[in-house]
Image: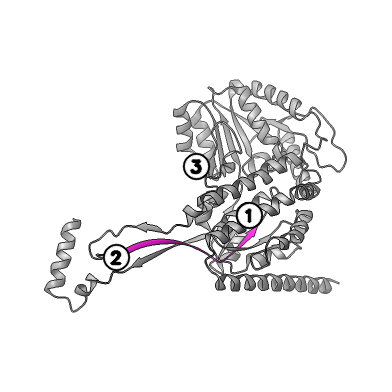
Amino acid sequence: MNEVVEVDKTNAEQSASTRLSDCLLLQREAYLSAPNPSLQQRKEDLQSLKRLLADNRDAIAEAISKDFGNRSQHETMLAEVLMVLDGINSSSKHLKKWMKVQKRKIETTVYPGAKNRVIPQPLGVVGVIVPWNFPIQLSLGPLTCIFAAGNRAMVKMSENSRHLSRLLISLVPAYFPPEKLTIFEETGSVGIEFSKLPFDHMIFTGSGATGKAVMAAASKNLTPVTLELGGKSPAVVAPDYPIKKAAERIMASKLFNAGQICVEVDYLFVPEDGLDAFVKHAKAWTHKHCPDINSPDFTSIIDQKSFERLTDALDDARQKGAKLIDLAEGQQALPGSRKLSPHLVLNTSDDMILREREIFGPILPLIPYKDKSDVVEYINKRDRPLAFYPFTNDKDLQRYYLDHVMSGGACVNDALLHPAQHDLPFGGIGASGMGHYHGYEGFVTFSKLRPVFYQANFSAMKFLAPPYGKLANKMINIILKRKL
């Protein structure tokens, strides 16, 4: 029996590998036959992407909700549909400027009459590995940058996005030929084979552990990789900031998508004398905005494994002395719904799972602090986070935190909103990722900024060829004198 299973697994891997390789070959041949799409063609590709999303937004939202068990339709529209449409519109507006050949200076007199130029050119075929938490934003979002830069793309969806994957696979051929865009469903072996392909660039969004495996596989082909990972992103409320406003904004972010967001506030520093007030206002906000966790407005945890991981983390904290505050005040979720009541957690310690691992759920540990230096020291002893959220109206304190805490991005006096700014690059640093996309930086990431030197009809270099003599010495001395 084991031998049969191993044979079936091998056949499945070979089948996935063949399909992927054939698609890559198709797209690469298409790229080589037309390596530099015009501005008009790129805008048409962006408009096709826009139509794909706009024409099918309700079906897409329904498919995502089925994959989650329940996903708020409004959250899908806000964080996925609207955000991607804004990105497409922004890229289309600026694309002509981005595509312009850049003039660069000749910095030495040795090359009179010559020219330096930088020409943005497409890389070729880009591979996109998509997570489940925002599957449209994190597939069509990168595609916006990829198509703006003139590339072709292969997209591998998450195993937790079955309904959406199959919907997109059925829809995409009506908008793009396979040599431009192909979507792949994860069937158990696709992801491994996908990361082994010799793409011209690959972008992965997901966990750090999987990101390391993807990068290791890509390194065998010297494929450049943009990694968008996660990490434990901290927030800090300063003594000068209104604690009620901070609680409202932080809880609004923490409950969005049930906290299943890579840039989510993972833990929060609160002044010691503001702890009780924060708890009070967090309870009031949750009671008002989430009166029923069984409502379709409150998103489910993606799968049973993740649900149990979160409940186990709460049990671990309770057993080790933490105080758990159920913000839904004991509401009972419907059986099988995977609705997890929002929690604040007090009196946490470093040996608790909640403090060790990224939470990725509606659970927020609160850490009291006395001095700003304590906050900075704690954060800087750990991996650099994907996001950082200082809440303060004090300009000097804002600068202090931004100077002393390095993160992939930051949002001052709110949370989650910086990735929605299309003229800002998005990306991690260190353990939270590498590389940037969104807007112009996305165009650059998926382009080769190709340096080209154009020599003039007359070249002074002929006077600097061997055998070297008095003329060469004289010319070098003149040049050096001007430089020194």
The residue to which callout 1 is attached is: 47
Residue depicted at x 26% and y 65%: 113
Can you say which quadrant of the picture contains the N terminus? Answer: bottom right
Q: Is the magenta stretch mostly helix, strand or loop?
A: strand
Report the disc number at residue 406.
3
Return the x and y of residue 314 as percentages of the image width and height.
Answer: 74, 37
* Above or below, 400 relative to 177: above
Tell whether label 1 touches label 2 (CB within 8 Å): no
Report crowding for label 2: few under 14, some 14 to 19, many 20 or more residues within 10 A (C-alpha): some
Stretch in magenta: 113-129
Query: Disc 3 vs disc 1: which is toward the camera?
Result: 1
Give amino acid for label 1: Gln
Q: Does the magenta stretch include residue 369?
A: no
Q: In whole angstroms, how far apart are the C-alphas of marks 3 and 1?
A: 37 Å
Disc 3, SS: loop
Q: In whole angstroms, how far apart are the C-alphas of marks 3 and 2?
A: 42 Å
* Above or below, 15 relative to 225: below
Give amino acid for label 2: Ala
Disc 2, SS: loop
